[in-house]
Amino acid sequence: MADALRPDDLLPLPTAAFHILVALADGERHGYAIMQDISERTGGSIRMSPGTLYGAISRLLEQGLISELPGHDDRRRSYRITAFGRAVAAAEAKRMSELLRQARATGLVPKLKESK
């Protein structure tokens, strides 16, 4: 039997998957609410189509990163992030933060102004 997956084993996450995990990090949501949250958090720059959303949700369910809430209407399924999903999202955020640090160090991205 294969060893259990570690959060880093799933990195880098597809962009859609990361946005869905972020949307679920502060509470359970149904699909349309996930799409709305992503659009709001990104200032409308990312508008996920239903096909992209539900394809990503299917993969996240298979990987155990999210779970479907039982007993909900089939037309409006709700999802929540799992403990493993939270760990994977945190590992991805850390990975992206390190990439941003490297980009700043090379001058590719402006350095943050230090607060007084």
Image: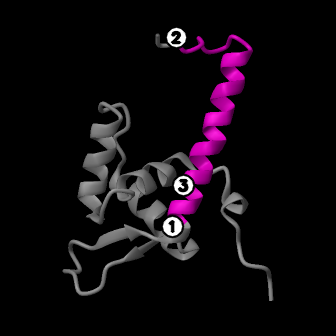
Snapshot quadrant of residue 68: bottom left
Q: How far from the left and from the top, in percent, is residue 56?
A: 48, 60
Give yes or no for contact between labels 1 and 2 (Cβ–Cβ under 8 Å). no
Cα separation between marks 2 and 3: 27 Å
In this view, the mark in front (1 or 2)? 2
Residue closest to the eye, 113 or 44: 113
Q: Mark 1 falls on what kind of element?
A: helix
Circle 1 crowding by C-alpha within 10 Å: few under 14, some 14–19, many from 20 = some
Residue closest to the eye, 12 or 56: 12
Q: Is residue 104 magenta?
A: yes
Return the residue at label 3. 89
- Image check: 116 left or right of 26? right
Q: How far from the left and from the top, in percent, is residue 60?
A: 51, 67
| Quadrant into which the N terminus falls | bottom right
Return the residue at label 1. 60
- State the extent of the magenta-drawn residues as a range: 85-114
Circle 3 crowding by C-alpha within 10 Å: few under 14, some 14–19, many from 20 = many
Snapshot quadrant of residue 3: bottom right
Q: Amino acid at mark 3?
A: Ala
Mark closer to the chain start, 2 or 3:
3
Residue closest to the eye, 84 or 16: 84
